[in-house]
Image: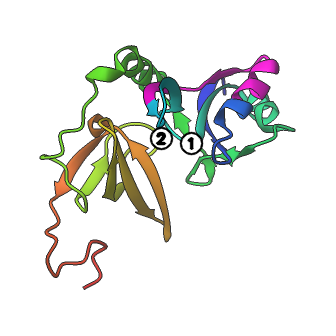
Amino acid sequence: MGKNWFVMRTKPRNENKVFLQVQKKNIEIFYPVLPTIKIWSDRKKKIYVPMFPGYLFVYGDEEERYNAIANTAGAMGYLMYLKKPAIVTQKEINSIKLSLAEPERIKVDKMSIRQGDLVEITSGPFAGLMGFVVEFRGTYKIVVNIIELNASINIELLQSEMKLIKHIEQTNERIYGNS
């Protein structure tokens, strides 16, 4: 089967811990982080936050995929698609790496996509799924509620990873289509 990129799920705020454990197993793992300025009442500090909270990317064959998660505290499992581990293409990984080179250039144009809008995800492990914009986080992340197979999950995406399907008016039309 060869090697592929797989999407590993982690417990909340355990990405770095899981990343370090898998790295010690000599398995290739990708943990995209973005710089941000954290402001306290007495100081400012540059910190790095996960680009995809709760997700890491593991590169390997089936054995490495299994070993990456075996006995790894904080690891929850792999993102599945059609009852198989979801695979991310090298092109998608390269796109994420390119976006990390200049994160300050990634901006969300709040006029084209608004809260409540129906969008389709165009790239990444969730490509082809549709969901509703729940909120904007900072200047580069959008939280989208994905509704597929009777399960609802919130994920953070870049605007470039989605396309607008329909503006949802905030009148009597319900966001989730149940009138």
Residue 28: name its quadrant.
top right
**Residue 146: quarter of image:** bottom left
Tell whether 161 sits left or right of 170: right
Label 2 SS: loop
Identify the residue shown where x is 52% and y is 32%.
49
Residue under numbered circle 2: 125
Task: Looking at this view, name the residue that lies furthest to the front.
Answer: 42
- Name which residue lies at 27% across and 39% down: 159
- The location of residue 47, given as percent across then percent down, is 52, 26
- 92 to 78, vertically: above or below: above
- Residue at label 1? 86
Label 2 sits on what residue type? Answer: Pro
**Is residue 129 among the parts visible in the rendering?**
no
Q: Are marks 2 and 1 in contact (CB under 8 Å)?
A: yes
User: Quadrant where the N terminus lies?
Assistant: top right
- For the point 69% across and 28% down, which residue is it? 19
Total labels: the figure holds: 2
Amino acid marked by disc 1: Ala
Toward the right, the furthest residue is 71
Q: Is 17 in front, or is 97?
A: 17
Q: What range of the chain is rendered magenta?
A: 19-37
Q: Is residue 15 above or below residue 45?
A: below
Q: Is residue 101 magenta?
A: no
